[in-house]
């Protein structure tokens, strides 16, 4: 009898916990939710977070407030989020930087895998390879031929050593078997100014900031870095199409919670965000930035982040990139 009593108590305890979790998710959120974005206002991450946050506010009747906590290559905002309470009232937008930084920085004060519960990858934004119009290359194959004929003479700019744009170029050089000179800048604006002016020949950049210069004729696009053509520029072929099989880079923007967040809240957030990114007004706004929506499961997103950390770890080591 005693054994049966112990089992019965255990079952009741388990049912009680499940009931409490269900009630918690049902009542969530009951107060303001913070959404930490590790970038300054105005960029793709900020635009996406505010679009999703506004719709969450509408759906829940509780404010979702975006907090821009930029600094230390996104590590400042990432650490703040990682060390926040795991009750579901702090959201975080992880990006490709969270896959690059574990190898790029000798020490981090958070673990990108252990310290977060990943909800979904909201969107991916492809990169784009452009050249100054004076460069005698109309596509990626011609650029590769030119670089092989003139090793270490062509200059490619990036938004800084170890940045996604720098590492995309390093991956390109490795896969194409070419040597070019890397010129790091303190952001996209100065890099774009110099490639438009012809001070450097090549730039690996983000679709959103580069496309206006392509459309005006100030720059020539040679390829996009996603596996499929970008909706914002369907006439520009991928690098994969042009012979660099499997070449895929680009920024991604997701949703995560501090590790240990209740699974019921993770599930509720996942369902709500996937619904939101399918809304026409949200899709149209973000698609104009060159984004492709994802909306995968928590398990799929977690596996994706693990793969990205391994992938970019190899590229960082291969490139010898150092923190500026």
Image (spheres, rainbow, N blue to C red):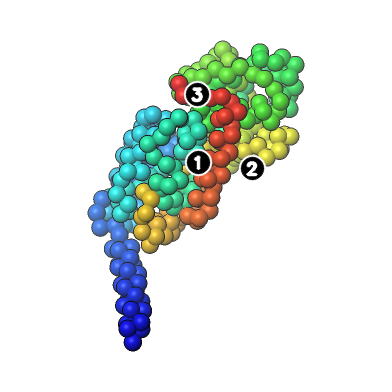
Q: Residue at x 74, y 34 (%)?
A: 243
Q: Residues within 10 Å of mark 1 (few under 14, many from 20)?
A: many
Q: Residue at x 44, y 42 (%)?
A: 112
Residue 102 lies, in percent from the top left, at 47, 35
SS type, badge 2: loop
Q: Residue at x 24, y 54 (%)?
A: 31
Task: Give the Cα separation between the discs numbered 3 and 1.
Answer: 22 Å
Task: Give the Cα separation between the discs numbered 2 and 3.
Answer: 31 Å
Mark closest to the chain's N terminus, 2 or 3: 2
Q: Which residue is mark 3?
A: 322
The quadrant holding residue 92 is top left
- Which mark is in front, 2 or 3? 3
Mark closest to the chain's N terminus, 2 or 1: 2
State the residue in front, 179 or 16: 16
Q: Is residue 191 visible?
A: no
Q: Is residue 90 visible?
A: yes
Q: Which residue is mark 2?
A: 228
Number of marks? 3
Residue 266 lies, in percent from the top left, at 40, 57
Q: Residues within 10 Å of mark 3 (few under 14, many from 20)?
A: some
């Amino acid at each position: 009898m005693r054994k049966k009593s112990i089992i019965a108590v255990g079952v009741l305890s388990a049912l009680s916990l499940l009931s409490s979790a269900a009630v918690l998710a049902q009542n969530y959120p009951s107060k303001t939710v913070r959404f930490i974005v590790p970038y300054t206002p105005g960029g793709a991450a900020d635009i996406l977070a505010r679009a999703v946050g506004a719709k969450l506010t509408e759906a829940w009747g509780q404010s979702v407030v975006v907090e821009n906590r930029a600094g230390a290559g996104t590590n400042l905002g990432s650490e703040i989020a990682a060390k926040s309470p795991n009750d579901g009232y702090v959201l975080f937008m992880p990006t490709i930087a969270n896959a690059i930084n574990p190898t790029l920085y000798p020490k981090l004060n958070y673990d990108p895998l252990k310290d977060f519960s990943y909800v979904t990858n909201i969107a991916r934004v492809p990169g784009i390879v452009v050249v100054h119009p004076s460069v005698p290359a109309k596509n990626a194959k011609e650029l590769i031929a030119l670089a092989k004929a003139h090793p270490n003479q062509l200059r490619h700019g990036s938004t800084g050593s170890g940045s996604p744009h720098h590492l995309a170029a390093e991956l390109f050089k490795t896969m194409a078997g070419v040597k070019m000179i890397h010129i790091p800048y303190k952001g996209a604006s100065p890099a774009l100014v110099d490639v438009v002016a012809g001070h450097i020949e090549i730039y690996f950049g983000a679709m959103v900031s580069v496309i206006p210069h392509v459309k005006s004729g100030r720059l020539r696009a040679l390829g996009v870095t996603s596996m499929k053509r970008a909706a914002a520029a369907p006439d520009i072929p991928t690098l994969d199409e042009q012979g660099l099989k499997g070449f895929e880079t680009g920024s991604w923007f997701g949703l995560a919670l501090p590790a240990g967040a209740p699974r019921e809240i993770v599930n509720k957030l996942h369902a709500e965000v996937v619904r939101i990114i399918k809304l026409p007004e949200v899709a149209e706004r973000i698609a104009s930035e060159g984004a492709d929506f994802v909306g995968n499961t928590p398990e799929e997103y977690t596996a994706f982040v693990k793969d990205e950390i391994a992938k970019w770890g190899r590229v960082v080591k291969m490139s010898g990139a150092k923190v500026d």
